Image (tube, rainbow, N blue to C red):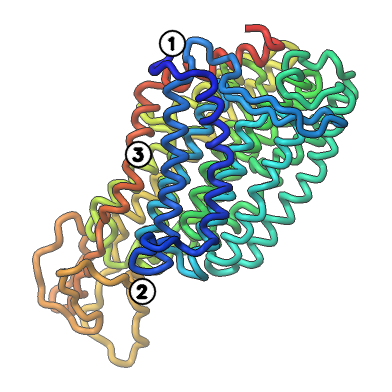
Amino acid sequence: MTVIDISPSVMQFLLAFIVVGPLLGAVAALLPAPPGLKGRNPDQAVLRHGVTVTGAVLIAAIVLAVGFDHDHPATMQATTDISWIPALDVRIHLGIDGISLPLLVLTALLTFLCALYSYFKPPAGPSPKAFVALVLVLESGTLATFAVLDLLLFFLAFEMVLIPMYFLINRWGGDQRQAAAWKFILYTLLGSVVMLLGLLLVGLKSGTFDMVALATDNGRGLTTSVQVIAVLAIGIGLAVKTPMWPLHSWLPDAHTAAPTVGSVLLAGVLLKMGTYGFVRILLPAAPDGMRTFAPYLAAFAVVGIVYGSLACLALARTGAKGDLKRLIAYSSVGHMGFVLLGIATMTPTGVNGALFANIAHGLITGLLFFLVGAVKDRYGTADLDTLAGATGAALYGRAPRLGALLAFAAVASLGLPGLAGFWGEMLTLFGAYSPAEGLSRPAFRTFMAIGAFGTLLTAAYMLIVVRRVCMGEHALPARTTPDASAPSAPSAPDTPQAPAAPGTPQTPATTPAPAASPTPGTLQAPTTPGAPQAPPAPQLADVQPYEAAAWTPLVALTVLAGLWPAVLLGLTDPAVQKLLSGGKS
């Protein structure tokens, strides 16, 4: 069944345009704007160019999804197969099925929302020309990773995203951006070198680099020892990008230093490239090797789940001076642990759960990084102790809609039933309860129990974040008499303050304000009769129209996927069944 009947040639063109279009747009972004399209200034023109190109790619991805034959999601569609390097039998082979289509649409959507957000709030740093070009190159590489069906093309697309992300962090990032960018590039490049050796081993030993042929062969052309070596080599490179504990240490630094748009793209799409490689390449092409390493992969996954949650709890506690962006980065280590656990079960239930969790994480964590970036812009910091505020005038009292959105994203991230985060975690745990034949059921049930414990830890730190950032904390009782000889108290953590919304009066921080009725939704500190009253905290700018435009699609899709999971599972399940059965539907 297709919503709209589109000819195969048009489908081929759409997929080729989705992959190549952003690359052409990146080249055009570096050229002078044509007369009549310059807008108010060159910076505005190039940012509008980014919105236009990513919008066109998103429209093409939606049309591709509408024309996709949903009755046969296990069949490769919109395929292009052209010989590229005949001597090595390397081909320009593109195609999509039910596994890659959701990731393709997610990437196009998040990149468009980032471009739209950047148009209204350009990143602080060098000229936007290079920024827009790098974002478009990043989009092209990510989309190509999910669309190519040749091992060497997959590797080229996989590596294509590294340089743009390095420069986005290094040129437009915050504190410690250079160290974070170098750590990111070194970790991923070293992992990629090992991965390339594994891909060459598979291609040369099997006689083909075609991923569809390898999936159909289902490892029959590779000895068990070759499969084990290939899974180890390729798996290391994929695990770095995922990131899997203990190869994750580049991620918190990269997220903390990256600009808001960089963090959204890094969490929303780049982390999915590693887990996609496990599903698309290793599970079908080297099943015996995967079966050998599956228990170890599951063990590392559940350690990552617990480790990420404990790190978040440590950052969330009062007085830890934890950075909210860093906390969300560590939460990604835990969430991607669930994805790896589902893949390690080697069952349709577990792999479907992993793919669902991939999409849910992209939607929810992308929204979280947007929101944290907005909070940091308003407060001037992402420090949790500062955001909590000594007066309790936190987000619910100062920017209620922004606080409500942050609370929504937090409860979606902890896996609240009815939202997207729930189904992926539940299915991966179900898959671990009954793993594939040949895997130790007691071991995987132990992993399931540890993973379930990790969901409780996730709920704990997310609720602490909501309480502290959205509700604030009570201040200590004020002294009954001022003591001039005592050292002055530190300034309230509400500073530094972003400018108040237009038309909102501000009370000077050094002048006590007359007693007034409390602001609705603002917690009040306990007072002592006769003690000087703290001034009410000034309001912050609440959600702006351009922010609502960038965030609303993520909120809506998070609710839709939670209430109607069949939208995704109907696409992925037939394709996963075929992949795990050696190309047989």
Q: Mark 2 Cα within 10 Å, few/some/many (few <14, many 20+)?
A: few
Q: Which residue is painted at 74% across and 56% down in the image?
A: 186
The three-letter code of the residue at mark 1 reads Met
413 vs 562: above or below: below
- Horizontal arrangement in the rendering, residue 174 relative to residue 216 (left or right): left
- Horizontal arrangement in the rendering, residue 178 relative to residue 522 (left or right): right
Q: Quadrant of the N terminus?
A: top left
Callout 2: helix, strand or loop? Answer: loop
105 vs 218: above or below: below
- Which residue is tagged 2? 496
Quadrant in which residue 303 is drawn: top right
Q: Which residue is painted at 38% across and 60% down in the image?
A: 37
- Give whichever of discs 1 and 3 has the lower sequence position: 1
Residue 309 in view (yes/no): no
- Which residue is tagged 1? 1
Q: CA distance from mark 2 to mark 1?
A: 56 Å
Q: CA distance from mark 2 to mark 3?
A: 31 Å
Q: CA distance from mark 1 to mark 3?
A: 26 Å
- Which residue is tagged 3? 553
